[in-house]
Image (cartoon, helix red, strand yellow):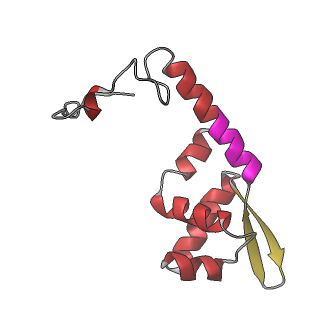
Amino acid sequence: MARKLAALAHPARLGILRQLGAADSCCVKDLVRRAGLAQSTVSQHLKILVEAELVSFRPEQQRSRYTINAPALRELAGVIGQTLDHCCAGCCPQAGDDTHSDPLRQPGAHAPAAGHKDI
């Protein structure tokens, strides 16, 4: 799971995933045109996403077609949800739950001091 999360840690890779999610499949040329990045950069990001098993590819004549690995992304989302449920049991408000209030969302609230680790 850590490898999958690390693959999602870059804004360009998130953008590539969004582009792939909007199409059945794409070749690098399509992604380069939409992302506005160099072909080598897009290829490197795709390599990381493929190694993390979040994206699949299949050779097609002189090109490769890339597709999102939806089951892997759903599994990752489930693990993240379970982790948050476990870590925040009883301390994090549920959606629509007014019994707990987030002090950082109150008027005049300040973010935690630098160096404070708040999960």
Q: Nearer the viewer, residue 25 or 61?
A: 25
Which residue is rendered at x = 38% and y = 19% of the image?
Answer: 100
Rendered-image quadrant of the C terminus: top left
Which residue is rendered at x = 65% and y = 40% of the image?
Answer: 76
Residue 107 vertical placement versus 50 (above, below) = above
| Residue 44 image point, x, y percent | 57, 67
Rendered-image quadrant of the N terminus: top right
| Residue 57 image point, x, y percent | 76, 66
Q: Which residues are magenta?
A: 70-78
Q: Nearer the viewer, residue 44 or 36?
A: 36
Dominant secondary structure, magenta: helix
Left or right: residue 28 versus residue 5 is right
Q: Is residue 39 visible?
A: no
Residue 16, located in which quarter of the rendered image? bottom right
Residue 83 vertical placement versus 23 (above, below) = above
In the displayed orientation, state which residue is furthest to the left: 108
| Residue 117 image point, x, y percent | 32, 28
Which residue is rendered at x = 74% and y = 71% of the image?
Answer: 25
| Residue 89 image point, x, y percent | 51, 16
Residue 9 part of the magenta-drawn span: no
In the displayed orientation, state which residue is furthest to the bottom: 62
Count of marks, rendered view? 0
In the displayed orientation, state which residue is furthest to the top: 90
Left or right: residue 51 versus residue 64 is left
Left or right: residue 12 versus residue 82 is left
Which residue is rendered at x = 27% and y = 26% of the image?
Answer: 103
Left or right: residue 11 versus residue 73 is left
Residue 43 vertical placement versus 99 (above, below) = below
Q: Is residue 52 visible?
A: yes
